[in-house]
Image: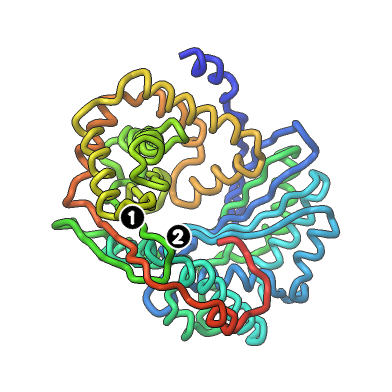
Amino acid sequence: MLLLLTFGPALAATEVHERQLDNGLKILVKPDHRAPILTSQVWYRIGSSYEYGGITGVSHVLEHMMFQGTEHLAPGEFSRIVAENGGEENAFTGRDYTAYYQNLASDRLEVSFELEAERMRHLKLSEKEFLKELEVVKEERRMRTDDDPQSLTYERFSATAYDASPYRNPVIGWPGDLEQLSLEDARDWYRLWYAPNNAILVVAGDVEPDQVFALAEKHFGPLAAETVRPPKTQAEPEQLGEKRLHVKAPAKESYVLMGYKTPSLADADAPWKPYALELLSSILDGGDSARLSRELVRGRQIAASAGASYRAFERLPGLFLFEGVPAKGQTAETLEAALREQIARVQSEPVEAAELERVRNQVIAAKVFERDSLFYQAMQIGLLETIGLDWRLSDTYVDQLAKVTPEQIQAVARQYLTPERLTVAILDPQPLESSAQTAARPQAGGQTHVH
């Protein structure tokens, strides 16, 4: 308990200042005067979970296009201006959001606002730049998914685990959809979603809130709102039994992926359950001292690697995941059986108080260190607001973890880690390509961004 008591005051929330412009843009400012720097982030409520069949990947392709020129900026000029002002910038696309950021000296905030306001409503979508960036995305897909057997397994696993949820689609898009994606698709997507009333502006750092609001009004205030109609949520039907699939792909080793349907914080029937699931994932996979590493990797040496993960902060219900690579001489079936044994253990035996306290302290310590980062502070605020939750949840996160009991962890394990909610994918390794085959593949040129 000493660690919890020691870290408590360090987690005291810095006040966040909030304002909304007449055009619907929401602005959140978190002052932090430790250094003369800031991060400015624009989050759009759009990502792959908003997409439909035929245009999957369009959100990510449009992210690329946002760096390729506006009515007043030539392709690449946005990045050049940020660099000339001593800053760094990038973007990322997820299932529930697309976000753009600049990290700058605190006296360069207006540079960020002027640039982001320009491309929020005045992007210039040319056929030439679109076709170039589309090829870049296709190459990203080949490198990160098609040529990565574990990523390929995860993609097919997700498409099997979800029957209706848009989480079944990859963020980068299905190959067939990328092949038929058009400039008009990107142009329509931009017009529909890139509007001030579908965006959240987050600034953290050495700033004064009134100054931020005044600059935001100056640059974003004149932008017109758009009629935004979010798609109806595709509810995932109840799963009626365990699902299994085998993925055959060139690989050196097998791979096991297991996922159980679980709620997110947005739809849980009790608010404590997602926090209990988060602690459960840390008990199983919270560093070298966690159960999976201690018992399956170092102890019984069944796995070369093993892990578990869960995300409480998502727009739609997700999955509690287990994954692992068998150790040399072990099989995927042996590893799967060992993972199931670990699940049965947390269902039958409450976590001991000392183990829970150790894990909880580790999680809290990680949160304390994360708050040293301006970027992380702003990212947590932007993420929560974009998926429809209150940014204040980031300030109560640690308090909620502190309330979770061993009995609650056992309860969620029993409720959600059941065969009726389970999908299992096994990677069946196939012979690897020769170096000549790999070298013969065409290469794309262009700019790559995080996604």
Left/right of residue 339 with respect to residue 225 in the rendered view: left
The percent coordinates of residue 28 (x first, y second) are 61, 44
Label disc, if present, on residue 95 of the rendered structure: 2
Mark 1 or mark 2, earlier in chain = 2
Q: Which residue is pictured at 56% across the width and 71% down the height?
A: 140
In-front residue for pair 382/103: 103
Label disc, if present, on residue 417 of the rendered structure: none
Q: Which residue is pictured at 50% across the width and 58% down the height?
A: 97
Q: Residues within 10 Å of mark 1 (few under 14, many from 20)?
A: many
In-front residue for pair 30/281: 281
Residue type at mark 2 is: Arg
Name the outermost residue toward the top.
2
Q: Which residue is pictured at 42% across the width and 82% down the height?
A: 176
Q: Quadrant of residue 165?
A: bottom left
In-front residue for pair 232/228: 232
In-front residue for pair 303/355: 303
Residue type at mark 1 is: Leu
Image quadrant in which the N terminus is located: top left
Q: Quadrant of residue 238?
A: bottom left
Left/right of residue 193 with respect to residue 426 in the rendered view: right
Q: Which residue is mark 1?
A: 257
Left/right of residue 437 with respect to residue 51 in the rendered view: right
The percent coordinates of residue 308 (x first, y second) are 37, 44
